[in-house]
Image (cartoon, rainbow, N blue to C red):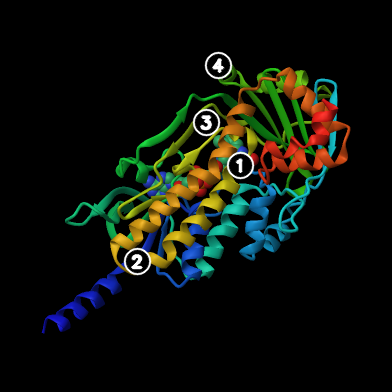
Amino acid sequence: MSLHLTSLQLDSRSSLMYDAIVVGARCAGSPTAMLLARAGHRVLLLDRASFPSDTLSTHVVHQPGVAALARWGLLDRVRASGCPPVDRVVYEVADIRITGGARGLAGQRAWYAPRRHVLDAVLVESAVAAGVEFRGGCTVRNLLRDATGRVSGVEFRHRGRTHREHAALVIGADGMRSTVARLCDAPYTVRHPRLTCAYYTYWDSVGTDMELYERQGGWVATVPTHGGASLVLAYFPQRRFDDIRADSGPAYAEQIRATAPGLAARLVGKRPLERLRGSGDQRNLFRRPAGPGWALVGDAAHHKDSITARGITDAFTQAETLVRHAGPRLVGSPPGLDRALRAYERECESLLAPGYRATLSAARLHLSEQRLSVLRAVSSDPELTSIYLDVFAGITTAEALYVPRLFTRL
Ligand SMILES: Cc1cc2nc3c(=O)[nH]c(=O)nc-3n(C[C@H](O)[C@H](O)[C@H](O)COP(=O)(O)OP(=O)(O)OC[C@H]3O[C@@H](n4cnc5c(N)ncnc54)[C@H](O)[C@@H]3O)c2cc1C
């Protein structure tokens, strides 16, 4: 009799329950949902937005992110959207000019910069194609908990009505201001002050290279994207944010003139293709990324200044890491899943810490003499240039530059 009851309960539970509910359907959420569904899980993906839609973000994808897209079978769709590969970088700082390409990763040498309304739509559609149930226009307001306090589902609003759904794991992929993190009381484990503010728009026929320009207190970059347009972005120290946002157009133009005079000359007589967008709210933080019945991926778990353009690539890495650990434990006992979530937490920390340190260092917008010496040595050696660009892409860490050959040059 009791066996019979148990199986009945299990049956009704499984028909009502998802293995995972993912909140947020962009770079972190859609790949997480897609990979879980490809592993055979029943997944609900919720976002308050509908797709395709844009979001405040530039969109450089470094080679580890490109390799992830290729592994997932999505790179061809990104290419087919007309997003060009970018395999040459020109980097100017002081009297130094570095040109070359990265060695790359897994056969991917090029960067891509697909517009977010394109990339995020490809990711959501691929999640749906894998069997994920996607519902747009749904805003998660609350978490559901079982009698032990374990997170067991979400409460969300859709078209003025409240809905509830249950799952073994609720995954917050809902960005830097994550509601899921707040409702789980996910503590900050690392926090640093904001360091920059960033403004960007698009210009026609700027060029086919990625161009990077740096000076004390300034950083400017151009990156080719769809339709012959280039993203042109400018970074300022955070302490200037109040002044800059008061009159951002002239400040943007002045930063390009001061940091990248050659580029500024090429933009004379042109008009930006779109309005100027920007943000001074680029927090630097890690949150605890998991607990009983919940996990965080992407910006919800870890956010950093966008100057190193690592957020999308890191979101992909976190998605794969979470699915590798938690995927096989979603069906089974809660303690098994919790052990897997702790392993995810440990791996995330070690994977993301080096990029975080590099980002804080770049975002200080400070050029030390030591750094200029390294860049000078890099500029005169094609092999070191490729290693340096691998460092920029997050493929390797700056230690890779410190080979004996470089030391003899300094
Ligand atoms: C100015 C700027 C430039 C950047 N440039 C780059 C770059 O060049 N390269 C790069 O790799 N990264 C860049 N980044 C970082 C990048 O944008 C993020 O790291 C990336 O978007 C993280 O993806 P995500 O899926 O974690 O979060 P998000 O992209 O923020 O997506 C979160 C999703 O969750 C949804 N959501 C939020 N709350 C709820 C809720 N309560 N209920 C339902 N849905 C919810 C939102 O609608 C959204 O769709 C930049 C960021 C900024 C601000």
Q: Residues within 10 Å of mark 1 (few under 14, many from 20)?
A: many
Figure quadrant of the N terminus:
bottom left
Q: Which residue is mark 2?
A: 18
Q: Is mark 2 within 8 Å of ligand 1?
A: no
Give the amino acid type for the residue marked by disc 3 in the picture: Gln
Which residue has dot 4 on it? Answer: 239
Residue 27 shows in this picture: no
Instruction: Answer left or right for 234 relative to 25.
Output: right
Residue 267: name its quadrant. top right
Nearest to N terminus: mark 1 or mark 2: 2
- Residue shown at 33% from the left, 40% from the top: 182
Q: Can you tell which quarter of the image residue 392 is in?
A: top right
From the image, tell me which residue sits under label 3: 282
Q: Which residue is mark 1?
A: 310
Spatial separation of the CA atoms under disc 4 and disc 2: 46 Å
Q: Along the polypeptide, which appears first: circle 3 or circle 4? A: 4
| Nearer-N-terminus badge (4/2) | 2
Q: Amino acid at mark 2?
A: Tyr
Q: Are marks 3 and 2 in contact (CB under 8 Å)?
A: no
Q: Nearer the viewer, residue 295 or 45?
A: 295
Q: How far apart are labels 3 and 2 at the CA level?
A: 34 Å
